[in-house]
Image (spheres, grey):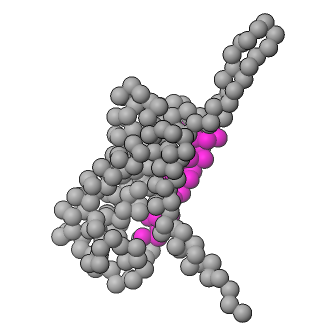
Amino acid sequence: MEFLNILYLAHIGFRLSPYMLISYFVLMSMFNSDVRGLIFLALLLTETFIMVSIGRALENFFPNTTQNGICNTLNLLNSGRLSGPVPLNLNVFAFTFGYLIYIIASNNLAGTPSGIMIMMFFSSMVIAHIFWLFTNGCAHVLILALTTVLGILLGVLFSYAISSSGDTNLQLFSKLAGTEVCKRATNEKFNCTTEYSM
């Protein structure tokens, strides 16, 4: 009797996690009838274009000499990575982490359960991607550091740009989910509603 290969399924899920993350934000935006997920996607595509350009410039200094076939799964090009030595899966999580860190810090949400969970999830995903890429020899350690730092910095910068535009409702997770808003209806009663905005 054959069983499912759990490690293989975990590997596929891990490699597809950046696509799942982006799909989640876009679908959340569509279901909530707002443009926040689409704005995030546009910012992510802009940042990815910047990182691909940097990766192509660094390609001569850090050629892709890996012989490990696992590093070349899910490539966009037959000849190798579109981004040269820069791993885009790590880039997606680093950018998203930086984007959300600014929102958490500027709204004083670091001590809230939602803020803590977001920081723990994204920091663990960034660390897991770095560990996986390094142990499999998929990227040089300097490229991993550069991708992580630039991704986080560009995420913070783009989130700051949205925040400084004056319309913070364009940011993902601009309000803490489950925040109660109460209005005094009479001297004795309160009408409370719960906003679920991410």
Q: Residue furthest top?
A: 187
In the image, residue 195 sits, relative to residue 126, either above or below, namely above
Establish if 50 lies above or below 63: above
Q: Is residue 105 visible?
A: no
- Between 138 and 72, the residue placed more toward the observer is 72
Main SS of residues in magenta? helix
Outermost bottom residue: 1
Q: Position of 29 compared to 59: left or right?
A: right
What percent of the width, then of the height, locates residue 43? Answer: 35, 46
Position of the N terminus by quadrant? bottom right
Stretch in magenta: 110-133
Q: Percent position (x, y) of residue 156?
A: 38, 41
Q: Residue at x 40, y 73 (%)?
A: 74
For the point 29% across and 73% down, the residue is 77
Which image quadrant: the C terminus?
top right
Pick the residue in front: 67 or 19.
19
Q: Residue furthest right?
A: 188
Q: How many marks?
A: 0
Q: Is residue 41 visible?
A: yes
